[in-house]
Image: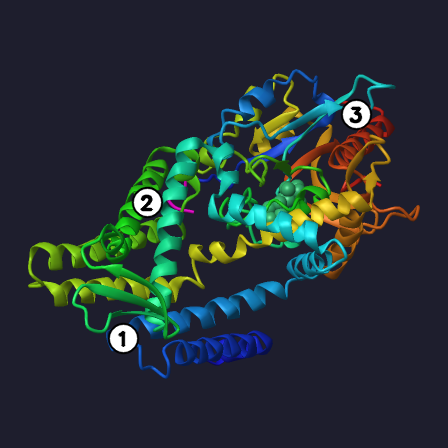
Amino acid sequence: MLKLFQTLNTQALIKATIAAIAVVILVLAGSRNLQNFDAALIAYLLGTVFAVFGIAYRYSVWLQRPPTRLYWRRSWQFLLSKDFPSYAWRSLVLFFKNILFQRFIYPRGKTRWIGHFLLATGCLIAFAVTIPLTFGWVHFTLEQGSFSTYNANFFGFKAGTFELGSPIAFLTFHALVWCSVLVTIGAVMMMKRRLTNGGLIATQTFEGDWLPLILLIAISITGLGISYDYTFLQGRTHQFMSVTHAVTVILFLVWIPFGKFFHIFQRLAQLGANIYKVEGERRGMAVCPHTLEPFASHTHVEDLKNISRDLGFDFRLENGKNHLDFSPEGKRSALAKAHFEARKNSGKFFG
Amino acid sequence: MPNTKYNQQMEFFIDMQRCIGCHACEMACAECETNGQESMIHIHYVDRAVSVQTTVQVCMHCEDPVCANVCPADAITKDDFGVVHTANTSRCIGCSNCVLACPFGVPIKSEPQELMMKCNMCYDRTSAGKKPMCATVCPSQALYYGTREEISKMRPDSVPVNTFQFGEQEVKTKVNIMMPKGSTHLKVH
Ligand code: SF4
Ligand code: SF4
């Protein structure tokens, strides 16, 4: 316990606390002082607040690492520069392409992409539905004087109307059912890969790779159980279904900051890395002294010299140059040449 | 990593002067399942204008891997056996920091996949007590995987070295390079 306090990161703690308090304030504001808050969801709310705290804490610790800090700083610097419109547009396009559609997974394998896309889409829609409900931002009321017209209210303001029994009502009230189906199919596809791919079998771990999939399936199945119960069993097993579902969801929420699901938040850095690359290329390329070809942006090479120095690596050479001025091929050739010289000087190339 | 039969007596020894540029290791590397059937080994002419010398480079599995240090996404990890694993696919953001900072020029960025990939010593094989693919096919034993005793019998005039000097920086690795007897390190620059 003492160690825990010693290793506690004050800066991260402050940011995480602010983030958690901000959520509570937004809950109070969005639910009109808890007027529209559904008390049955209190456990989910607590789980979400904890998740926000944990995610903010880990994110903040993560951003303190020199390479991450640099990308963070540079991304904002380039995004908020005079080229804001073009970088903002590029980020938006990439957000759809790489975050919502995870396009970069497609070249890694078609079924892999389908599996991940189903799983991710199910999760993202489920977040979009449940978080506003849990926070009391969205709630449904019957239109005054009507028994069949429903109002959807957002932050206490009427945002839409639909008829009970209409297709929209069916889709809305079953949104999480569709999500569960997507997630289950996706998770099963990902599990199949993990059972059959030799490379994955050799490197995967239970808590890192299997547990997240098991947890997602558990959430989906118990969630479907709730629907099954009120549709076909007249709510006879409601308590059991809702408790098991709540347990799995809360486990998931609490675990987001620690486990594999944190990659959902890390992935956003890919947008920054992309802007960094484009802006770097515009500013000029570094040319390898060995291959005489441009290989990376000058900014990137210089930034890496600084980062690696911050991390305790000093690749400065006697002639004032730096080993990092060489391209990967240049570095390999430099090593091969040095090896050749050493062998030559010994008088024997082999043996 | 689970269920491992990794044999810590076995080590990797490379000797680029023995490389004849046959590309057999490149073909074999693509058989490794941990890199999704893509070849990760580097073979190329050192300076084609003046020499026909080729060189071969696998990941050296550094003791303090620069690649992992400069990775903003914590995607590269070193395991208990000293194997530095290729990027964790869910974390890597494809920034190429590792590609540019690795002193041996090892990692490869796959642009369409926005992912870094590199040699992880055929972990599917080495964790099962087998040899890495490249070392099993290299006809000139520029790449050799075995025990220290075996290599010292085969190369009585050479000694395995795992310390490299790049300017101010010393880098120690798990993979050895075969050097003339009496050498303690290889000074690259
Ligand atoms: S050789 Fe390069 S890629 Fe391999 S562990 Fe060392 S720094 Fe990382
Ligand atoms: S390319 Fe991937 S593994 Fe390499 S430094 Fe960037 S995030 Fe890390």
Q: Position of residue B86 (x, y in %)?
A: 55, 42
Please, what secondary structure does the residue beneath circle 1 have? loop
Q: Chain of mark 2?
A: A
Vertical relation: A32 (above or below) B122: below
- Mark 3 falls within which chain? B
Q: Name the front one of labels 2 and 1.
A: 1
Mark drawn on residue B46? 3
Cα separation, mark 1 vs mark 3, equals 69 Å
Helix, strand or loop at label 3? It is loop
SS at mark 2 in the image: helix
In the image, A76: left or right of A45? right
Please give left or right for residue A315 compared with residue B10 in the image: right
For the record, the magenta segment spans: B1-5
Q: Residues within 10 Å of mark 1 (few under 14, many from 20)?
A: some
Q: Which residue is the site of mark 2? A: A187
Task: Please say if the residues under marks 3 and 2 sit with CB atoms less than 8 Å apart.
Answer: no
Label 1 is placed on what type of residue? Asp
Relative to B183, residue A223 above or below? below
Towards the viewer: A314 or A34: A34
Is B3 included in the stretch rendered in magenta? yes
Q: Is residue A154 left or right of residue A181?
A: right
